[in-house]
Amino acid sequence: MNHPITDLLGVRHPVIMAPMFLVSNEAMVSAAIRSGIAGTFPS
């Protein structure tokens, strides 16, 4: 997986934003996706 953020960080695996209880929201997940990482909501 090649993306500017993974190239910048020097990682070879996808970056995933962990769900954070009480602070995860739609804007946060959208920003993560636009940055090229997987955004998630807590269940």
Image (tube, rainbow, N blue to C red):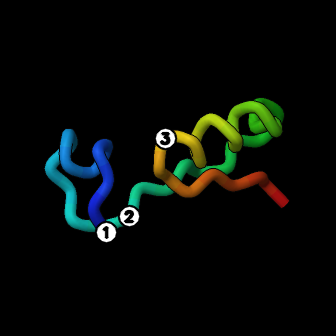
Residue at point 77%, 52% (across, down): 41
Work out whether 39 lies above or below 23.
below
Q: Quadrant of the N terminus?
A: bottom left
Work out whether 12 lies above or below 7.
below
Of mark 1 and mark 3, the one earlier in the sequence is: 1
Foreground disc of the pair 2, 1: 1
Residue at point 75%, 37% (across, down): 24
Q: Which residue is mark 3?
A: 35
Task: Classify mark 2: residues with Cα within 10 Å, few (<14), some (14-19) or many (20+).
Answer: few
Residue at point 27%, 51% (across, down): 6
* Amino acid bearing label 1: Met
**Pointer 3 with pointer 2, Cβ within 8 A:** no
Q: Which residue is mark 2?
A: 14
Q: Quadrant of the C terminus?
A: bottom right
Of mark 2 and mark 1, the one earlier in the sequence is: 1
* Amino acid bearing label 2: Pro
The alpha-carbon separation of the residues under discs 2 and 1 comes to 7 Å
The spot of residue 22 in percent (x, y) is: 82, 34
Mark count: 3
The alpha-carbon separation of the residues under discs 3 and 2 comes to 12 Å
The spot of residue 16 in percent (x, y) is: 49, 56
Asked whether, in this view, residue 14 is left or right of residue 43, the answer is left
The alpha-carbon separation of the residues under discs 1 and 3 comes to 13 Å
The spot of residue 9 in percent (x, y) is: 21, 43
**Pointer 2 with pointer 1, Cβ within 8 A:** yes
* Amino acid bearing label 3: Ser
Helix, strand or loop for disc 2 = loop
Helix, strand or loop for disc 1 = loop
Residue at point 69%, 34% (across, down): 28
Q: Which residue is mark 1?
A: 1
Task: Classify mark 1: residues with Cα within 10 Å, few (<14), some (14-19) or many (20+).
Answer: few
**Pointer 1 with pointer 3, Cβ within 8 A:** no
